[in-house]
Image (cartoon, rainbow, N blue to C red):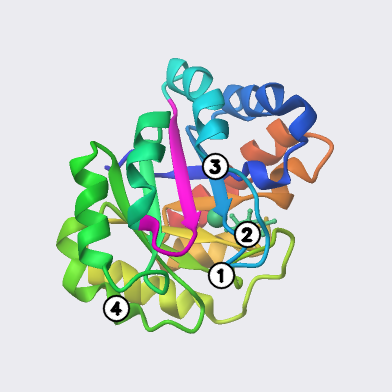
Amino acid sequence: MSDLRGIAPSILAADFSRLGAQVQEVVAAGARVIHVDVMDGHFVPPITMGPLVVDALAGLVHEAGGLLDVHLMIERPERHIADFAKAGADVISIHAEATPHVHYALSAIREAGCRAGLAINPATRPDVAEDVASIVDVLLCMTVNPGWGGQPFIPGSERRVAALKALGGPGVAVEVDGGIDARTIGSCATAGASLFVAGSAVFGTDEPAEAVRRLAQAAAEAAS
Ligand code: DX5
Ligand code: ZN
């Protein structure tokens, strides 16, 4: 089974004044995938973080046996893959809507030694992934519109999760991102998702470690 599974806490919702400690806390609670949301002020309005933050967390995450999952919400992501790979990214996901060169970008991610992911927005048809399914490791289904944490899960997204799972087959993990919490995680797991990004539902609580454990349990129960 792919190691791209379980809860992926999104540091977008973390307290950046103590980022290392926050990441350490969720890793100690069993999270093995740390999600990093990169936004450029063009593909999505906000500007967030870049390779420097990936580099700052790489040692800590890798020593614990974890993976850095970098979600590029940026235009023309192919221009930045080398920088993120060098900084220590393990998985790099690009958006289907962000470049005319999806196949090239995904190939470049693998050539840089990383796992490749294709992300799709809520209005993008899942079959956009069909012709690149053989060169991706993960298909990322946005369950909110990208750009901000704390938004509500878009009802009916499970249908898109199931379509991506069918397209990717057993070797490709399906990741869900946006509005994932104790209420929404179960139906996504049942639909075929195995990697669950959670920002507010983890770092927006008083006890991120406990939140990771609860979400993991809810996902496991739904999938079994
Ligand atoms: C949104 C980001 C998400 C975000 C999720 O554009 O891609 O990863 O951090 O945040 P929550 O879990 O709060 O919806
Ligand atoms: Zn994300």
Q: Is mark 2 within 8 Å of ligand 1?
A: yes
Kindly state the secondary structure of the residue where label 3 is placed.
Answer: loop
Measured as percent of width and height from the top left, residue 27 is found at 57, 26
Pointer 4 residue: 128
Which residues, given as a range, are shown in magenta? 66-77
Alpha carbon of mark 2 to alpha carbon of mark 4: how far?
A: 23 Å
Q: Is residue 56 magenta?
A: no
10 Å neighbourhood of mark 3: few (<14), some, or many (≥20)? some
Alpha carbon of mark 3 to alpha carbon of mark 4: how far?
A: 27 Å
Q: Is residue 75 magenta?
A: yes
Question: Which amino acid type is marked by label 3?
Answer: Gly
Alpha carbon of mark 2 to alpha carbon of mark 1: how far?
A: 8 Å
Question: Which amino acid type is marked by label 4?
Answer: Val
Front disc: 2 or 3: 3
Q: Looking at the rendered structure, which numbered label has been put on residue 180? A: 2
Question: Which amino acid type is marked by label 1?
Answer: Thr
Place residue 14 in its image quadrant: top right
10 Å neighbourhood of mark 1: few (<14), some, or many (≥20)? many
Q: Earlier in the sequence, mark 2 or mark 3?
A: 3
Pointer 3 residue: 50
Task: Determine contact: label 2, label 1, CB under 8 Å.
Answer: yes
Place residue 66 in its image quadrant: top left
Task: Determine contact: label 2, label 3, CB under 8 Å.
Answer: no
In this rendering, position of residue 26 left or right of residue 3: right
Q: Earlier in the sequence, mark 2 or mark 1?
A: 1
Pointer 1 residue: 143
